[in-house]
Image: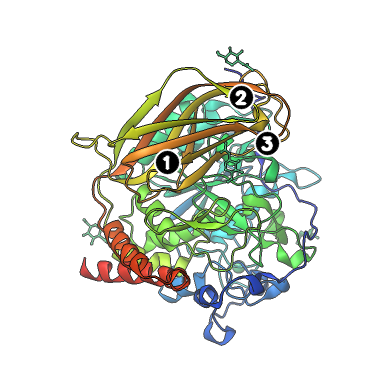
Amino acid sequence: KTHCPFTRSLMSTFHVEYCLFPQSNVLDQEGFGRQKRGYRSIDEIYIKMTDPLFSKQWYLINTGQADGTPGLDLNVAEAWGLGYTGRGITIAIMDDGIDYLHPDLASNYNAEASFDFSSNDPYPYPRYTNDWFNSHGTRCAGEVSAAANNNICGVGVAYNSKVAGIRMLDQPFMTDIIEASSISHMPQVIDIYSASWGPTDDGKTVDGPRELTLQAMADGVNKGRGGKGSIYVWASGDGGSYDDCNCDGYASSMWTISINSAINDGRTALYDESCSSTLASTFSNGRKRNPEAGVATTDLYGNCTLRHSGTSAAAPEAAGVFALALEANPNLTWRDMQHLSVLTSKRNQLHDEVHQWRRNGVGLEFNHLFGYGVLDAGSMVKMAKEWKTVPERFHCVAGSLQDVHKIQSGGKLILTISTDSCHGKDNFVRYLEHVQAVVTVNGSRRGDLNINMTSPMGTKSILLSCRPRDDDAKVGFDKWPFMTTHTWGEDPRGTWVLEVGFQGDEPQRGALKEWTLMLHGTQSAPYIDQIVRNYQSKLAMSKKEELEEELDEAVERSLKSLLSKN
Ligand SMILES: *[C@@H]1O[C@H](CO)[C@@H](O)[C@H](O)[C@H]1NC(C)=O
Ligand SMILES: *[C@@H]1O[C@H](CO)[C@@H](O)[C@H](O)[C@H]1NC(C)=O
Ligand SMILES: *[C@@H]1O[C@H](CO)[C@@H](O)[C@H](O)[C@H]1NC(C)=O
Ligand SMILES: *[C@@H]1O[C@H](CO)[C@@H](O)[C@H](O)[C@H]1NC(C)=O
Ligand SMILES: [Ca+2]
Ligand SMILES: [Ca+2]
Ligand SMILES: [Ca+2]
C-alpha cells in the first residue's frame, strides 16, 4: 500500500477571488417557489446584539450584506428565538490551538475538555509565528462559541456552548496516534468534534484514517456520549474541481458528517470539492473581492477578523448548528443527526453551475457538491425537539465481484449486482442510510478514471470524478470505500449498476479487480414511508412542473403530520 507523505493540510488557504460570470443572476434562475422559504424580510428579525461584527456575520443572518442574497443563511435567528443557544453542549476544535485568553472566547472555554497533543500538555495555546499561521483554530472556535452581547467581535452560532481546544496539527508530521488520541479525547464530555483538515488537497492524493484513528472513530460513534455517539464534523476539502472528496477517507467516512460551502450569493466557492459523500453545506468566502464576504470571527491575541475562509470555515458552522439541535434534544444519536441534516437542509438559493439538483428515489433533493443543501438551524431544532431515535442499523453485503475486468479506452466497463438486501435474514436493510462501494481498480492514469453507480430506484451517484493532476499509474485504488449519501431512504433491493470509464482520448489500460457493495440502514423508518406515499401520489398527477414546485412542501407537510402523531 503506497501513501503520499503523511501530511494534513488546512482547508483555508486564502484563495484568489475572481468572478467567473456576472453576479446576482442567481435570482433570475431560480423559481420564486423556492425562494420564499429562505426569504425573510429584515423587519421580521428582532435580534439585537451589541457585538460590533454581528452585522457582518451574513452567514448567521443574511440581509444582503456584501452583495449577498437575503435569506441565504443558517437560519439561526429562528433557533435562537426558540431559546436554543448551545447551552450545556461542548464542541471540540481539533486544530492548531485556540487563543483561550481571547475575551470573546474565555467565558465559553472548556479547559477540562481541552488538551495539547502537539506538545503533550493541557494547554492548547497556539504557537506564535510572525505571520499568525496558527490562527486557524481560534477562528474556527469563534464561529461556534464566541460570546454574545459583550461588545467584542461577533457572535457564535451556538453562543452559549462551551468550546474545547484540541491542539494536534502543529508538529512536523502527523501520526496515527495523535489523530486517534484527538478524536477519542474525553468522549463523555465532548459532544461534537470539528475538523477542518485532511489529506493534502493536491488533487492526486488518495488517503484516509489509519488503523488507530479508524478504531477511535468507530469507538466514538458506538460509545461516545453515553452510547449515543460522538458527532464528527468534517470539512469536505479545498482542492476545488481538481480534487474529489471521495478520495479523502476522513470526509468520505460514514462516521463523519462532511460539510461543503456556499458563498454569500449561493454559488459554489472555487475551492469546493464535490463528491457523493458530502451530506450538507454551510457558508464561507470565495469569488468575491469584497473582504466583508468572508467569515467574521475571532482571531489571535484578542483580535477579530472578517476573512476566515475555505471549507475550514464551513465545518465549525455546522458544529454550531448541531450544538443547537443537541440542546433541543440531547437524546439524538450520531445517526439521528445525519437524518435530521438530510431532512431539514434546504436547497434555498444554492446554485451549482456544474451539477443539477436531482431527487432520489424517495423524493429527497440533493446536489453532487452541496449534498442535501444548506443547514437550517430553525428547522433542525424544531424537528429535533420532536424526534424519535431512528431504528437499529443493519449492514448487508449485497454482493462482491472479485474477477478481473479490463477497462478499455473509449468504452466503459458496466457491471451489475442484483441483491435482495439480505431479505429474510436478521441483517435485512430496507431503508438505506450510507452505501459503500469498495473498489480495487488500476489504470494507466488514475486521474482519468471515473466511476458512477446507479441504485435500483434509479439514482446515479458519481463515486469518482476525474482528477487532472493525478498521474498515478501503479497503485490505483486498493479496496477503497467510495461512499454515497444520495440514495438515503431508498429501498436497495434490485439491480445496482457500476460504470467505470476513462476520460479523454488518450489510449488507456486498466482493470477492475473488486467491487463489493455494502448497504447500511434500517429495517423500518416510518417517516420515509410517509414521504414515499406522498411522492408517489404526487407522481400520479400529470403536471410535472406542478409536482416539482409542490414536492418540497409535500415532504415537509408529511413530516409534520407524522411527527405530530408520534
Ligand atoms: C491585534 O490586537 C492587538 C491588541 O489589541 C493590536 O495591538 C493589534 O494591532 C491587532 N492586530 C491586528 C493585525 O489587527
Ligand atoms: C430523552 O430520553 C428520555 C429517556 O428515554 C426521555 O424521558 C426524554 O423525554 C427524552 N427527551 C427528549 C427531548 O426527547
Ligand atoms: C492492473 O492490474 C492488472 C491485473 O492485476 C495488471 O495485469 C495490469 O498490469 C495493471 N495495470 C496497471 C496499469 O497497473
Ligand atoms: C459518470 O457520470 C458523469 C456525469 O453524469 C458523466 O460525465 C460520465 O461520463 C459518467 N462516467 C461513466 C463511466 O459512466
Ligand atoms: Ca501547550
Ligand atoms: Ca462577542
Ligand atoms: Ca481533498
Element type at marker 2?
strand
> Alpha-carbon distance for marks 2 and 1?
51 Å
Q: In which quadrant will I find the C terminus?
A: bottom left
Q: In which quarter of the image is the N terminus?
A: top right
Task: Check disc 1 and report its element: helix, strand or loop.
Answer: loop
Residue in view at x 45 percent, y 46 percent: 485
Look at mark 2 in the image and give the residue it sits on.
Answer: 408
Q: Please provide percent x and percent y for residue 377.
A: 47, 66
Seen in the picture, residue 1 relative to 200 is either above or below; the reply is above
Q: Earlier in the sequence, mark 2 or mark 1?
A: 1
Residue 552 falls in which quadrant of the image?
Answer: bottom left
Residue at 34% over, 34% down:
418
- Rendered location of residue 52, percent (x, y): 67, 73
How many residues crowd mark 2 within 10 Å: few (<14), some (14–19), many (20+)?
some
Residue, disc 3 = 467
SS at circle 3: loop
Q: Mark 2 is on which residue type?
A: Gln
Quadrant position of residue 388:
bottom left
Q: Which amino acid does label 3 sit on?
A: Arg
Residue at the outermost bottom position: 43
| Residue 119 visible, this angle | no
Q: What residue type is labelled 1?
A: Met
Q: Where is residue 379 in the image (x, y as percent from the top left)?
A: 42, 68
Reading the image, the residue beneath label 1 is 186
Q: Earlier in the sequence, mark 1 or mark 3?
A: 1
In this view of the protein, can residue 62 be seen by the observer? yes
Label drawn at residue 55:
none
Q: Is 127 placed above or below 14 here?
A: above
Q: Earlier in the sequence, mark 2 or mark 3?
A: 2
Foreground mark, 2 or 1? Answer: 2
Marks 1 and 3, how far apart in space?
A: 38 Å
